[in-house]
Amino acid sequence: MQEVSLYFHIPFCRRRCGYCDFNTFAGMNHYIPDYVKALCGEVEIVLSQAPEKLLAHTIFFGGGTPSLLQPEDFGRIFASVRRSVDVSGNAEITLEANPETVTRESITALYEVGFNRISFGMQSASGRDLHVLDRQHDNLSVLNAVQWSKQAGFKHINLDLIFGIPGQSLESWRQTLELASRLDIDHFSIYSLILEEGTRLKRWVDRGLLDNPDEDLAADMYEFTMDYLNQMGYQQYEISNWARSEEDQCRHNLQYWRYLSYLGFGAGAHGFWQDTRTENAGQILDYIRLAQNALQANFPAGPAVRQVNRLSLWDLLQENMMVSLRLTQEGVSNLELKERYQVNILEVLRIQIDKLLRQGLLESVEHENRLRLTRKGRLFGNRVFAEFVGNPNPNDLKN
């Protein structure tokens, strides 16, 4: 029985944040009942076509703001999942939530319906930073959300944080980390702000209403984060993720970083099955129409799919390198990739690997036959990952 992860995209938001370029929509919450019905239909159609028995060991609801759905909505989705696939007895089941959208009662109901991991978008402890990001919550909302989650029974709680915000100081970032770490949770996901084209924040910076983020200061913030969280007992296991212990790591995201199969459901959701990538229609109404009216699917593609890409062996190998090198301790095992692809990466990617070793961005763990990022490599991760994009296919590497 093959283990697989299931991702559900919930694209509804009360308000679209100024920095967000995700597939999200505000003012469409009245479509939630139809959307839930479409999700249930998509799940049952797709999973009924699977070529072998599947065991879901992680389930993740992302968005958007999944916490806008009611517990009974999730109950219906979980019922469809369990009718269609086996679910591991210790499956990790995660919900992303905005702090201002939950109450003590709603969090208790979410735990009772089946969630055992919850992730809140805190972003910053600074009111100024939250205003720049166009966020609607405050610190009290975060404190309450975390406390209510613990009282409900959640043992795995994550906070999302953002650094490199225009006008943010190293001192205000330190205060954010101090407040967040005092909440006694087991996981942090911490990202450098990216000014995405088409967002309000990018337009404000382009018009001179906000300063352009300082890249050198952002690098200082990242280094401070690595040192501070290490002192607080958190292990950096991925370039943007810290956990108290191996048990506290996000198993769903590890599925991505280890380049293993996952199925995506919902508007704009992406999936990856063996050598095939899928992408669903992004607009809510398009998705609902396609998912509700279909009677069959061509696994792993579902009824709402708009794009299916089959990857070559060379594509798979490069993507695997790029994704798995994000794992700061685990990195990439030459032996594991050789077993998976019958290819020696130290031969076919020798030029790229030797270059990164010389630059001090990669290190070789000889006794494990493994490559991983150095501390410097974590700072310049995009430079490392770019080395495994678009390289010419060696003539002797065939599918």
Image: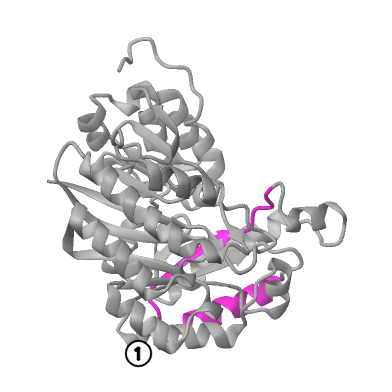
Q: Position of residue 139 (x, y in %)?
A: 59, 84
Farthest front residue in view: 293
Q: Which residues are magenta?
A: 169-196
Q: Position of residue 85 (x, y in %)?
A: 19, 52
Q: Position of residue 389 (x, y in %)?
A: 50, 30
**How many marks can you see?**
1
Residue under label 1: 151
Quadrant location of the C terminus in the rendered image: top left
Which residue is painted at 28% across and 36% down in the image?
299
What's the residue type where badge 1 is placed?
Gln
Which residue is painted at 67% across and 76% down in the image?
172
Foreground of the two, 65 or 150? 65
* Magenta region includes residue 177: yes
Which residue is painted at 43% across and 48% down in the image?
326
Q: Position of residue 170 (x, y in %)?
A: 67, 71
Which residue is painted at 31% across and 72% down in the image?
115
Horizontal relation, residue 47 to residue 214: left or right: left
Q: Is residue 75 above or below residue 347?
A: below
Foreground of the two, 51 or 148? 51
Foreground of the two, 45 or 25? 45
Foreground of the two, 242 or 56? 56
Query: Quarter of the image holding residue 193?
Result: bottom right
Horizontal relation, residue 167 to residue 253: left or right: right
The answer to whether residue 182 shows anywhere in this view is no
Q: Is residue 191 above or below residue 180?
A: above
* Magenta region includes residue 140: no
Crowding at label 1, few (<14), some or many (≥20) Cα neighbours within 10 Å?
A: few
